[in-house]
Image (cartoon, helix red, strand yellow):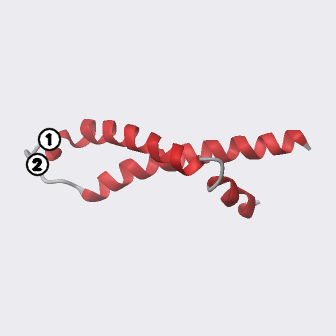
Amino acid sequence: MLRLACRCAFSDGVPRRSFLVALVVGTVLNVINQGEALFGAAPINWIKIILTYFVPYAVCTYGAVSFQIRKMRQEQ
């Protein structure tokens, strides 16, 4: 199951689509959560910035992989 999930995560444009979603959602969330830091009024928390991009990437990838696996099971 893990091997299938990994294969799905790196196929059919999933990484590119997840990257684009993470770029948009992560940027919006970073501006909301760390706007003061990004515009120079407070120190930047780099861990929060990285996680704010990683979480939407992981969620989008999970959604795509679970959809692909469910679709494969229905076709059997």
Give coordinates of residue 70: x percent, y percent: 78, 42
Q: Are marks 2 and 1 in contact (CB under 8 Å)?
A: yes
Q: Residue at x 65, y 48 (%)?
A: 12
How packed mark 2 is, by other alpha carbons closer than 10 Å (few <14, some 14-19, many 20 or more), is few
The crowding category of the residue bearing disc 1, from other C-alpha atoms within 10 Å (few below 14, some 14 to 19, many at least 20), is few
Residue at 22% x, 43% y is 34
Q: Which residue bears the numbered disc 2?
A: 42
User: Residue 72 versus residue 62: which sits nearer the camera?
Assistant: 72
Earlier-in-chain disc, 2 versus 1: 1
If the image is split into quadrants, where does the C terminus sit? Answer: top right
Q: Position of residue 45 (x, y in %)?
A: 23, 55
Between residue 56 and residue 48, name the one nearer to us.
56
- Residue at (39% x, 49% y) in the render: 53
Q: Answer with the quarter of the image where residue 22 lies.
A: top left
Q: Which residue is mark 1?
A: 36
Classify 10 as above or below 57. below
Task: Classify mark 1: helix, strand or loop.
Answer: helix
Viewer-closest of 35 and 13: 13
Quarter holding the N terminus? bottom right
Q: Is residue 3 left or right of residue 28?
A: right
Q: Amino acid at mark 1?
A: Glu
x 32%, y 36%: residue: 28
Label 2 to label 1: alpha-carbon separation? 6 Å
Asked whether, in this view, residue 72 is left or right of residue 24, the answer is right
Q: Give the SS element for disc 2.
A: loop
Q: Amino acid at mark 2?
A: Ala
- The residue most toward the bottom is 3
